[in-house]
Image (cartoon, grey):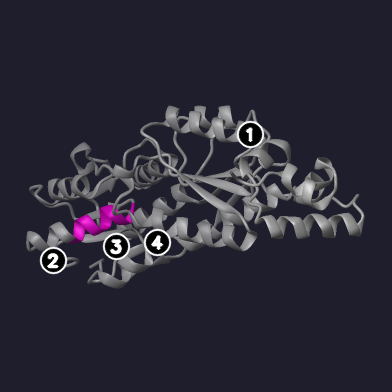
Amino acid sequence: MSTTIYDIARVAKVSKSTVSRVLNKQTNISDDARERVLKAIEELNYQPNKLARALTTSGFDAIMVISTRSTKTTTGNPFFSDVLHAITARAEDEGFDVILQTSKNSEEDLDKCLSKIKQKMIKGIIMLSSPVNEHFFNELDKYNIPVVVIGGLKGQYKNILSVDTDNFHDSVSLTQTLIDRGFQRIACLHAPLDYHVSRDRLEGFKSALVDNGLTSEPTLIVDGGYTQNSALHAAEKLLTCSPLPEAIFATDSLKLMSLYRVAARLNIAIPQQIAVIGYSDAILSFMLTPPPSGIEVPIQALGDTSSALLFDRIANKQTPQIVVLPTESVITGSLS
């Protein structure tokens, strides 16, 4: 049978409430009583019941990280693993545990969140992406717990904070780079429009075309899905068009990688036969030849900033509601 606080109180010759005050690091205890309780804890090898303590004190020192996507749609996408690594590193420095939550759908995600909030199992939440349907945020905002979203927000909230890059204007800038180099028949390989980041990047692409008097051909705007297979299939659809588009804008690193792979298989030379620009990451930029032009998403900074913002809120510090991180466009060999 495991040791209880009653056993500690008996050995230390103090009351149960005194043992509780020592465990909860309260100060209204004599030095002698505290020393006897700590000695009894060591002798009895007492392991506190974290759940029981959480229900009677301020809760666990833990945060929850939610992908808001099923594992099937995040496998092979470096963003999720890299940003999670940055968050867990900061949590470790803060002495917090990290609970990684995955679910089949957003309703299941919400139910799990609310359950852990009510049980005082978490003190904050980081969401790795921002769904267009903000019902999730509306429900979480009813509870006095900080939630940091990596992505944009459209609604106004009290407890929901956002860390993001300026996806719309970055996409306008990348598309304008193609137009300034003389390309007019430009395709876009994008992610599903369930999330603000995907929608903002596609809208930025379309806006740049309109501003320059160009039309967006429906057949040249293709949804690449979430998985490697769906992205490869969509890239092949674009790269087997007749005639080929002059250039392709890829809205994330998975789409960019798929374009390179399919182009190599079809013996289509980048940039001699088709120009490519888009959003990349450090590893992909290092591995691909020629290096892709575009924006390297600041994954480390997104993870660092979102976790710093969350822990500041947990500590009741004043924080901004929205943080927009700067990005830099790099033009390399993937444009002719």
Inter-mark Cα distance, 3 to 4:
17 Å
The image quarter in which residue 267 lies = bottom left
Mark 4 lies on a secondary structure that is strand
List the residue tagged with mark 1.
157
Question: Which residues fall within the magenta stretch?
Answer: 252-260
**Where residue 48 sits: x, y (%)?**
65, 48
10 Å crowding of disc 2: few (<14), some (14-19), many (20+): some
**Which mark is in front, 4 or 1?**
1
Tell me which residue sits at (68%, 34%) in the image.
Answer: 144
Is the N terminus in the top left, top right, bottom left or bottom right quadrant? top right
Could you tell me the amino acid type at mark 4? Answer: Ile
Q: In this view, does 189 lie above or below 268?
A: above
Inter-mark Cα distance, 1 to 2:
48 Å
Give the number of the disc on residue 85.
none
Could you tell me the amino acid type at mark 1? Answer: Tyr
**Which mark is in front, 3 or 4?**
4
Q: Which of 98 and 3 is in front in this view?
A: 3
Give the number of the disc on residue 295.
4
Could you tell me the amino acid type at mark 3? Answer: Arg
Q: Earlier in the sequence, mark 4 or mark 1?
A: 1
Inter-mark Cα distance, 2 to 3:
18 Å
Q: Earlier in the sequence, mark 3 or mark 1?
A: 1
Q: Nearer the viewer, residue 33 or 116?
A: 33
Can residue 274 be seen here? Answer: no
List the residue tagged with mark 2.
269
Give the number of the disc on residue 181.
3
Tell me which residue sits at (63%, 51%) in the image.
Answer: 47
